[in-house]
Image (spheres, rainbow, N blue to C red):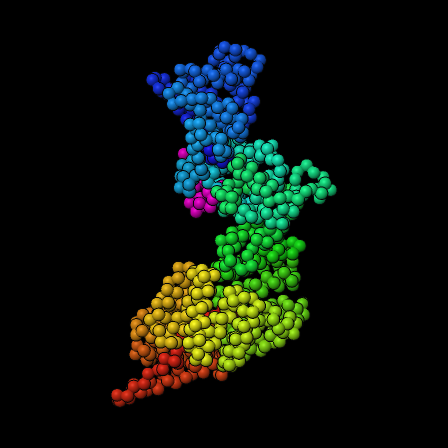
Amino acid sequence: MLVGNGGVGKSQLAASLARELRDEERSGERGLDVLVWVKATEPDQIITTYAEAAERLQLPGSTSDDSGSVAEAFMAWLAATERRWLVVLDDITDPGMADRWWPDGNARKGRVLATTRRDDAVLSGKGRTPIPLDLYTEEEARAFLHRRLTDAGHARLYDTDAVDPLIEELGRLPLALGHAAAYMINKRCTTSDYLARFRDTDIGLSNLLPPDADTEGYGRPVTTALLISLTAVQAVDATQLARPLLEFISLTAPQGHPAQLWSTPPALQYLRTSRPGQRRWLRRHQPVVTAQQVQDALNCLRTYALVTQDMSDAPVRIHALIARAVRETIPAGTKRTIARVMADALQSLWPDLDHQDRELAALLRTNTLHLDEHTYPALWQPDIHPCIYQVSRNLTATGLLDQAVEYDRVVVERSTEIHGPEYRDTLAARNNLAVSYRAARRDQEALVLSERVLADCERLLGPEHPNTLTARSNLAVAYRDAGRDREALVLSERVLADRERLLGLEHPDTLTARSNLAVSYRDAGRDQEALDLRERVLADRERLLGPEHPDTLTARNNLAVAYRAEGRDREALVLSERVLADRERLLGPEHPDTLAARSNLAVSYRAVGRDQEALDLREGVLADCERLLGLEHPNTLAARSNLAVSYRAAGRDQEALDLRERVLADRERLLGPEHPDTLTARSNLAVVYRDAGRDREALVLSERVLADRERLLGPEHPDTLTARSNLAVLRDDVETAQQPSTATSAMDSASQHPSNTPERPE
């Protein structure tokens, strides 16, 4: 028995086998005496075909008007005859009915070959062996297209670059690939041209995969083959939910969607009013749809192979072409309604914190993107649905920073096009883009955009609107990233004062403002004030959010940094170890925040003289960052710089120098020559050059760093003062080295300005 979805070639394989057996020379146990092909979708078809076979064989009683009795006589003859026979039951849709008319056969004289989309238990047993037929593999699909086009004399139509995307768009379905190949041959269009047409949703499947392109003998149009089971489903669906549920599912991603999506209140409420054949006023009075009824409808769809699900709690999947065929039957107005309801359902499942269920969050992100792609602009009107913004937050939380920037850029473009540049959703989208720029260390772009967003928010919303306060806070962070610490401090103090007055002392946004002000105090050298704020923020978050909330872990980490700045290294070490243990347990060992905690613990180890442990941690962090984030991610560059610090402390000078040169080259290329991190990398390389005795190169770099910092940060900035001090020490060392004396002077290692992994500002 051949089992598989529509279009995988069950009937074609059965027909090929039947022809092969029919054409064999009859001798011994080879060849056939009787071949009966039965269309088995309905019981009447089986009975009629059996009766016709009995009449052609001139069996006793075959001329009776009672077709059922004649069919039974044919079954009895098959069981008793010594002649060799094959009965093909093609496309069984009702296993119970088919079991009643399943002939008894054996390997010596007769066989039954069946095809079906269903996977009911009744179809196995009694000596019947289900043989699953699946989609083509990528290699098989590629080979089929190449051979089909080449055999037709049109090998030039095979565009290698477009083949793999086309195969995935067609879902590796043999039926669709056969029709597509014939279309390309008939229209003389390349695989690239066909792919572009296929992605144009204004062109229906019936035009892209037309019936006259059936050169492989499938016998029916693609859309008919894909949806033929739907009629049978509706006939047996007692819940009357299968059809509207399938319409819902057609808008989900082929990779699968969470099974619990259909038990959410938005989905249940919509399904309650969407049963077919009801007037609108009657639909509103329909009884509540239960989760069990939805599960029954889902089981019905799965039984008829319209959807797949490995286990009851596993993701539900639908083949891409089945989904498209269903989508093309949904009226435009209904599709918009379904899109908003599904977005509500997806949003209701999203974890408050993505790390609580990372697999679920990733699946929800994939489905949101797919939903938006196939229903645009439904999620953008009348307002942008919150799940659009949720995707951006998830990309950033997952560490996919470049993807977050590109996604937010598109969101801004679409919102501007639909709502205009000054609409509140557009302002929110621009603010999100600025945050993503900053996360990706594209600091100048973040700064420019943050200034524009704040100006627009103040003009359009007023100086005390919550969105304006957020924009002001984000601009303060952008100023700090750009080294404009004084401006950052002024804004941070204003934001805290406004939030305390407008939101209260214990509002989460107020705690964030207090934490950000602590960073500005630290940068301004006001360490005790920074420490006092850090201790207060941690105490408040532990009390209000709980000891394991991510914001509490961040506050604990920040307090460790403050303790370290005050020379309280032992207390910093205790906190850093706790933060790492909590993040490994709560977020997982590979989460970006966990990697940052591991890097910060290395700093604490080094501060207490545990240099080898610090070095081991930093080597692990760099390896993890390169593997998980990529070679050029900002956190990877910082990890590489930090490892250079440990190599230098361990006397592995050449390795330290190699890393410093690489970090500077990467930062100049990726961030630009005047980015604060680039200046730090240049300063650190100067220190390593001095260690290596390359005094002239060290002097040139140090002079450039001081000039750049004076110009960019101002003469009194702490980093400028450090650069001036480093240059003075270096000049003294060079002058001493040039004098005929045995006295030497080395640059104090404390004057180095290592770029430890920076905390992510809140």
Q: Residue at x 47, y 70 (%)?
A: 557
Specify the segment rendered in magenta: 151-170
The image shows residue 422, relative to residue 301, as above or below, that is below
Q: Is residue 157 magenta?
A: yes
Q: Position of residue 418 (x, y in %)?
A: 64, 56
Q: Looking at the rendering, which quadrant does residue 45 occupy?
A: top right
In the image, is 638 to the left or to the right of 377?
A: left
Q: Looking at the rendering, which quadrant does residue 575 occupy?
A: bottom left
Q: Residue at x 67, y 67 (%)?
A: 460
Q: Looking at the rendering, which quadrant does residue 452 occupy?
A: bottom right
> In this view of the protein, which residue sits in the foreground, 544 or 440?
544
Counting labels gives 0
> In this view of the protein, which residue sits in the foreground, 652 or 516?
516
Q: Residue at x 34, y 17 (%)?
A: 27
Q: Is residue 554 magenta?
A: no
Q: Position of residue 201 (x, y in %)?
A: 57, 44
Q: Residue at x 37, y 68 (%)?
A: 618
Is residue 332 in sight in this rendering?
A: no
The image shows residue 169, relative to residue 726, as above or below, that is above
In the image, is 483 to the left or to the right of 423?
A: left
Q: Quadrant of the N terminus?
A: top left
Magenta stretch: dominant secondary structure? helix
Q: Position of residue 337 (x, y in %)?
A: 65, 47
Q: Position of residue 189 (x, y in %)?
A: 49, 40
